[in-house]
Structure formats: structure tokens, C-alpha cells
Image: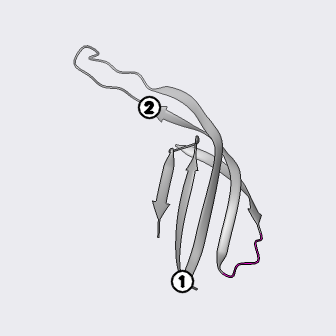
Amino acid sequence: SLGLRGAWHYGFEIPNLDVYLGATVGGAFTTYNYEFNPSPSPSFHLFGGPFVGVGYAIDPSINIFLEAGADVAYGILGV
């Protein structure tokens, strides 16, 4: 998979808080191999959609974030 993401970050007056929204667009090659298809062929499909997120800097080198949207995944939580 390869995709591009763009985001707009809103600057609330709360230190270390990052609120953003954006969109993703990309493409992926996939191959399905199953019992009734002895010679699978690769296919290409496009993906993309909007997302919103919020992040908080606990420390200058540690951030937590939560994203929701209809792009690569419906929800992402990370550190």
C-alpha cells in the first residue's frame, strides 16, 4: 500500500493539545490465494477518505493520539 495524507491542525489555546482533520488517498496491490483459485492474480484498488484526530504531548518525546475516520482504518490509537 502507498498513500498520501493531508491534515489541517486547529490551534486551541490548550498547551500540548493537537486537534486535526484531513483526508487520505492511495492504492494497494492485493493477491487472494484460496483453495478454489490455484493461480491467483494480483489486483489493484484505490482507498481513501476523511479522518479526524486528537493528540496530546505528555512529554516532548512522547505523544498519545486517537484517530477516527473512513480512510485506512475506522479507528487508530497510538503512543
In this view, 71 is above or below 38: below
Which amino acid does the dot numbered 2 rest on?
A: Thr
Which disc number belongs to residue 61? 1
Q: Are marks 2 and 1 in contact (CB under 8 Å)?
A: no
CA gap between label 2 and label 1 equals 36 Å
Which amino acid does the dot numbered 1 rest on?
A: Ser
Residue 66, percent from left and from top: 53, 60
Mark 2 closeness class: few <14, some 14–19, many ≥20 residues within 10 Å: few
| Residue found at x 65% / y 74% | 17
In this view, the residue in front, 76 or 2, is 76
Q: Residue 12 sits in which quadrant?
A: bottom right
Q: Which residue is mark 2?
A: 30
First to last magenta residue range: 11-15
Residue 4, percent from left and from top: 66, 49
Q: Residue 34 sits in which quadrant?
A: top left
In this view, the residue in front, 6 or 37, is 6
| Residue found at x 47% / y 70% | 79
Mark 1 closeness class: few <14, some 14–19, many ≥20 residues within 10 Å: few
